[in-house]
Structures are given as structure tokens and as C-alpha cells.
Amino acid sequence: MLRESVRALAEAKIAPFAAAVDEEARFPQEAHDALVANDLHAVHVPESYGGAGADALATVIVIEEVARVCASSSLIPAVNKLGSLPVILSGSEELKKKYMTPLAKGDGMFSYCLSEPDAGSDAAGMKTKAVRDGDYWVLNGVKRWITNAGVSEYYTVMAVTDPEKRSKGISAFVVEKSDPGVSFGAPEKKLGIKGSPTREVYLDNVRIPADRMIGAEGTGFATAMKTLDHTRITIAAQALGIAQGALDYAKGYVQERKQFGKPIADFQGVQFMLADMAMKIEAARQLTYAAAAKSERGDKDLTFQGAAAKCFASDVAMEVTTDAVQLLGGYGYTRDYPVERMMRDAKITQIYEGTNQIQRIVMARNLP
Ligand code: CAA
């Protein structure tokens, strides 16, 4: 039921704008409004804070169905979860109430600020500092590649509070867009997910009350990693949705397109490609849903499974969207058809929330 209703909504209210959002590299406001109106913008927020209380699998299905028509729009529910999960996992009850309530209402989105210009894969090498000043912390630094920066109202920011201790000297904070000293860089000019703004976040003597720290001092890196264990699965869902969208489009196209006097779907070479695409998508789906169930239960092997699902599903998305372009031939290579957008959008899923090379490091360190 959930899948059917999200699919109907996505096709009616999100798909019609997907090409324009990509072409104009603009925020998918129509998608945002439709998601908020249907309580699908941050489904993971527990009911006790006014949220929909969706479990990890339901959240995955929402993201998958939105990504099937517009990857940029799927970053609204996905990054709302990524940005807010540190608070849900490690924050005080006051912090949860304060920030999950407006998020659930649709009054403010959440972003996640881990990466920096010189700290991508090596997240613990960050330079952003937070220095205690009485009842306040003062933050200084630059965060880079921040999804939905500028649009989001709230930011989970990881910063160094004790430079001697590397990962154990990092703490997490909630920073608000309206905090004096917060500003944003120019939107990055990207290959895909053009509707989702990616900008730098500048923190210039941002003075925030001490109770905005998420969890205890020094636990920010562990919180950031625990968060990714859960949310890499949402990126797997996004990848899965993009791949399914490309397969669905190609499946229709090959039945319409005639060459040598018959639909190209009648040729075995085309059939084999479609079969492989569907097989890989189904494998990615099973892995992703199993990982979502593990996320919900908090299973011990979640770290491995989350990384595996993200890595596998994103590689599948890249293969399947590339094959979809191939099936459409010259037409597939033009912006008159959606599959080239899907191929460009798929690429980021192999890169963000940890490159697929990092996923392999994570898997190797956590072999089942
Ligand atoms: N759960 C809980 N704690 C964890 C953990 C996990 N999964 N992984 C690590 N930790 C903690 C541990 O306490 C560990 O300390 P111990 O020695 O006591 O075990 C501490 O963190 C340090 O861990 P490592 O020694 O493994 O740290 P490392 O420096 O070797 O880095 C890494 C590990 C896996 C490479 C990590 O840096 C990483 O994941 N890098 C990729 C960063 C990333 O994914 N960035 C994505 C940005 S968000 C994004 O892209 C969002 C978007 O736009 C949509």
C-alpha cells in the first residue's frame, strides 16, 4: 500500500517536474511541497515527535519510489534522515523535541556536515573547530559538499573539540541556518542530482549554546559513523529507485521502437540486456531491504550490510542506467529522454556517503 501510494504521488506530482528541475538546476519545490503535504518528507521521525514513525524499510520504500522518477527529489527524505539521525541516535531528549518536531511538521529540513575540502574519505582528518566559551561553543571552519545546504534550516555539524585525540576528539552539534556567522558557498555545478543544492557551509565564529552538542563531548565521530551505518541503506534505496526508473523506461521503449520490421524487444540481444538489468535490480533490492531490516533491529552486522547494500546497489544503478541509455541508442543520449539524466544521477550514488572504495574498506574491517 505504501509503495502504491508513494508511486502514484511521485508520478502525479514529482515526475512532471523532474526534467525541468535537472535542466534548470533548481530545487524541486513542487516535490518538497507534495512530500510535506503527504507527510513523506521525513517519514523516519518517530510519532512521539509528531512524525510518521516509519521504520527503516518503509523509509527505504519511500526514497526508492521518489528516486524512480526524480533522484534530486529523493534527497529530501533521504537527507532529512541523514541530518537528523545523529540527534535521534545520540541527542538529549530536549534536543530531539526541539528539532524533530519542526522537521516532522515540514517547517525545516536537516543537512549533515561531515566532509571538508581536505577531509572527504578521511573524515576524521577534519579541521573545523569548536572551542568552549562558558555556556557556549564557538565554531569555525568550512564544510564542503553539503547536500541541501542553504535550503535546510538545521545542520548537524561535526567539529574538533580536542585536536590531540583525532576521532575521539570530535563532537557533533546542531547549527541553525539563522545562527550568526553561518553562510553558504555558491552551488556546485554538478553532473547530476542538479535539483539538490550542494554548497559549502561556512562557520565563522558561530556561537551556539552548549546544549546544542549532540551526545557527550568526543562522541561525534562515532555518532557520525553510526548514522552512516543506517543511512547508507537510504542511498542504496535511491540507487535502486534510479535503476528501476531506467529499466521501466527502457522496457516501454523497446516495445515501441521498431527496426528491421519489428519491435527491438523481439531481438534476443535486447531481451538478454533487459533480463540482466532486472536480475541485478532484484538482487540489489533484496540486499537493501535485508539491510533495512537490520537497521531497524540494530543487528550487529549492520555496518557490513549497510556498506554492502550501498556499494552493490549503486554499482547496479550505474550499470543499469548505462544499459538503458544503450537500449535507447542515439535517443538515449539526448535530454529529450529521461535515461541520460538517470545515468548522470546514478553516478553520485557510487561517490557520496562514502565512496564505494571506502565501502569496501568498511566491509573488509567488518567481515561477517
Ligand atoms: N559505528 C560506531 N563507531 C564507529 C564506527 C561505526 N560504524 N566506525 C568507526 N567508529 C568509531 C570507533 O569508535 C573507532 O574507534 P575505536 O578505535 O575505538 O574502534 C573510531 O570511530 C575511529 O574509527 P576508525 O579507526 O575506523 O577511523 P578511520 O579514520 O580509519 O576512518 C572510515 C574510517 C571508514 C574510512 C571513515 O572515515 C569513513 O567512513 N569515511 C568516509 C566518510 C563518508 O562516508 N563521508 C560521507 C559524507 S556524508 C554524504 O556524503 C552525504 C550526502 O551528501 C548525501
Image: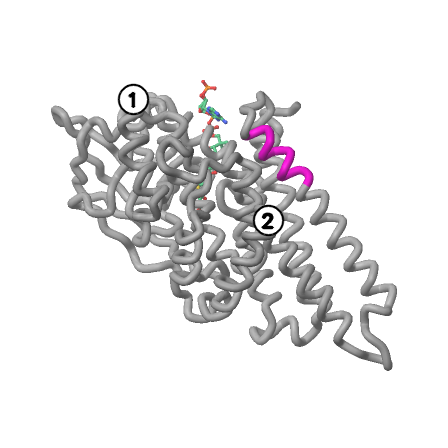
Give the position of the C terminus as an image quadrant. Answer: top right
Can see residue 347? no
Q: In this view, does 71 lie to the left or right of 108?
A: right
Can see residue 351? yes
Quarter occupied by residue 268: bottom right
Q: Nearer the viewer, residue 239 or 348?
A: 239
The verdict on residue 263 being magenta is no
Q: Which residue is drawn at 60% across and 61% down?
A: 343
Q: Where is residue 321 in the image (x, y as percent from the top left)?
A: 65, 59
Quarter occupied by residue 219: top left
User: Where are the magenta residues, as a range?
Assistant: 286-295
Q: Is residue 79 above or below residue 138?
A: below
Label 2: element kind: helix
Of discs 1 and 2, which sits in the foreground?
Answer: 2
Magenta stretch: dominant secondary structure: helix
**Which residue is outermost to the front?**
1
Q: Is residue 190 above or below residue 143?
A: below
Q: Residue at x 86, y 69 (%)?
A: 266
Give the amino acid at mark 2.
Arg
The label shown at residue 3 is 2
The verdict on residue 292 being magenta is yes
The label shown at residue 61 is none
Quarter occupied by residue 101: top left
Q: Name the residue under label 1.
A: 217
Give the amino acid at mark 1.
Glu
Label 1: element kind: loop
Q: Position of residue 43 (x, y in %)?
A: 45, 42
Q: Which residue is drawn at 86% across and 81% down?
A: 261
Q: Is residue 326 left or right of residue 262?
A: left
